[in-house]
């Protein structure tokens, strides 16, 4: 029967089942591309429908940060109310201006929020993260990045501020994490700020004329209806499992027919499945900056 050719190797030619042919793999790739395009369209037309539901805790993030510092022989940083406020305002500004960067499109700098919150630093820094599911993932991602790790383990810092704020960014429900570090020690006479592996000296004029910021953070308790990342990941695993089963059936049937050959094509199929599975297992929707 014709339907058998979709699941079993062809009876006469012994060609692979249609569902695991190279043509089918190209179709699967195209469908996943179209799926991502569809998610982008939904994000644009129905903001907030898509997104992830994170379980992040501000205090836990500070605790994990200090654990990493202590592992490296550094003293802990103390939570500072002004830096907490600066971090929250920076997160809210990213939602308000719809950007994901250290510097805002309007020209606002990270130290504008720090100085505007009343913290007169001599040395400060910032780490950003978005769309992680839990606190451990955030700090692990920062520690896996050389520039973020260097910032997190900077011995010049004595204070820390942390904010976890939810909102809609680029049409999707997003959880932003802003980590602000600072020091008011007079050992560093030239105010400096570090982010993304780059240190910027802050001009004295900017430092002295920074206006106070009194805006409130308007965190939104958004519950997205659909998690596109989990859907894509699940669909990927289902497809990989299906292809693995069909490849196994293919080998068993051909062995019974007495025509089994381990060709480079079969090895390539298995290698692709292995790489795809490993990629999915290690993938994460989170990003750091």
Image (cartoon, grey):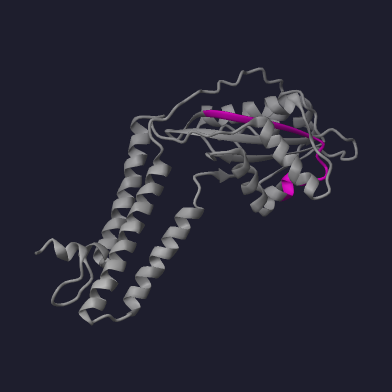
Q: Is residue 42 left or right of residue 283?
A: left
Q: Does the image show residue 197? A: no
Residue found at the far left of this picture: 1
The spot of residue 104 in percent (x, y) is 58, 35
Magenta residue span: 150-166
Would you say residue 155 sits in the magenta stretch?
Answer: yes
Give the quadrant of residue 270: bottom left
Of residues 135 and 8, the one nearer the viewer is 8
Of residues 122 and 239, the one nearer the viewer is 239
Query: In what quadrant of the picture does the N terminus appear?
Result: bottom left
**62 above or below 10?**
above
Q: Does the image show residue 138? A: yes
Which residue does the image show at 76% across and 23% down from the upper left? Answer: 118
Of residues 49 and 136, the one nearer the viewer is 136
**60 above or below 153?**
above
The spot of residue 197 in percent (x, y) is 69, 49
The spot of residue 7 in percent (x, y) is 21, 63
Which residue does the image show at 26% across and 58% down from the upper left? Answer: 27
Q: Is residue 189 left or right of residue 12?
A: right
**236 above or below 204?**
below
Image mark count: 0
Which residue does the image show at 48% across and 54% down from the upper left? Answer: 281
Give the quadrant of residue 89: top right
The spot of residue 16 in percent (x, y) is 23, 70
Give the quadrant of residue 111: top right
Which residue does the image show at 14% across and 73% down from the upper left? Answer: 11
Q: Is residue 95 left or right of residue 151?
A: left
Would you say residue 151 sits in the magenta stretch?
Answer: yes
Residue found at the far front of this picture: 256
Q: Is residue 144 left or right of residue 249?
A: right
Query: In what quadrant of the picture does the C terminus appear?
Result: top right
């Amino acid at each position: 029967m014709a339907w058998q050719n979709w699941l079993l190797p062809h009876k006469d030619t012994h060609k692979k089942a249609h569902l695991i042919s190279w043509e089918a793999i190209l179709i699967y790739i195209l469908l996943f591309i179209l799926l991502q395009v569809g998610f982008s369209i939904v994000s644009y037309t129905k903001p907030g429908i898509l997104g992830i539901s994170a379980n992040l805790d501000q205090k836990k993030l500070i605790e994990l940060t200090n654990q990493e510092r202590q592992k490296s022989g550094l003293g802990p940083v103390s939570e500072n109310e002004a830096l907490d406020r600066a971090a929250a305002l920076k997160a809210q500004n990213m939602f308000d201006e719809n950007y994901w960067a250290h510097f805002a499109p309007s020209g606002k700098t990270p130290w504008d929020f720090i100085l505007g919150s009343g913290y007169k630093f001599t040395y400060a820094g910032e780490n950003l993260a978005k769309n992680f599911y839990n606190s451990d993932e955030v700090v692990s991602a920062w520690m896996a990045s050389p520039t973020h790790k260097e910032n997190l383990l900077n011995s010049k810092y004595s204070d820390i501020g942390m904010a976890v704020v939810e909102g809609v960014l680029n049409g999707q429900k997003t959880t932003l994490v802003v980590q602000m570090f600072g020091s008011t020690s007079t050992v560093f006479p030239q105010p400096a700020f570090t982010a993304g592996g780059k240190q910027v000296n802050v001009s004295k004029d900017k430092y002295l004329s920074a206006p106070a910021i009194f805006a409130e953070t308007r965190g939104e308790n958004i519950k997205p209806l659909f998690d596109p990342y989990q859907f894509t990941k699940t669909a990927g695993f289902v497809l990989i499992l299906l292809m693995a089963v069909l490849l196994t059936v293919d080998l068993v049937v051909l062995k019974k027919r007495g025509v089994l050959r381990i060709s480079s094509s079969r090895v390539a199929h298995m290698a692709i499945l292995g790489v795809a599975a490993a990629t999915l297992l290690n993938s994460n929707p989170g990003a750091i900056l």
